[in-house]
Image (spheres, helix red, strand yellow):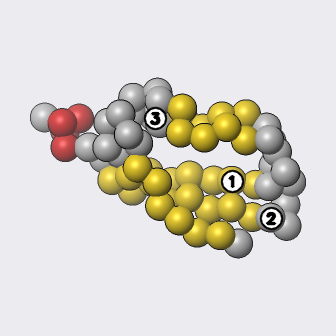
Amino acid sequence: MKKGDAICPRCGAGFRRLELSSIKGTGGQFRCPVCDFVLEAFDGSTQVAYRLTIVPSRILD
């Protein structure tokens, strides 16, 4: 398992990224749920999950 962090370059939202190489995933894209920016495209060779950890302050205004 690989763990890491990612930040959306458009809105600044922060994410925890987990990747499991022992499980096949689904191809597609992960889009930021705050601004809809494409953060990553998947080929399905591994299972990848994102969790929102930091909500940009301007969204809270």
Give the amino acid type for the residue marked by disc 1 in the picture.
Val
Q: Which residue lies furthest to the top in this view?
A: 36
Cα separation, mark 3 vs mark 1, equals 16 Å
What residue is rendered at 84% in x and 51% in y? 45
37 sits left or right of 14 in the view: right
Give the amino acid type for the residue marked by disc 3 in the picture.
Pro
Which residue in the protein does label 2 denote?
21
Image quarter where the N terminus lies is: bottom right
Q: Residue furthest left?
A: 61
Q: Which residue lies furthest to the bottom in this view?
A: 1
Q: Where is residue 61 in the image (x, y as percent from the top left)?
A: 13, 34
In the structure shown, which secondary structural element does the residue marked by tag 2 occupy? loop
Which residue in the protein does label 3 denote?
33
What residue is rendered at 82% in x and 45% in y? 44
Please tell me how crowded label 2 is: few (under 14), some (14-19), or many (20+) other residues with Cα within 10 Å.
Answer: few
Q: Which residue lies furthest to the front in this view?
A: 9
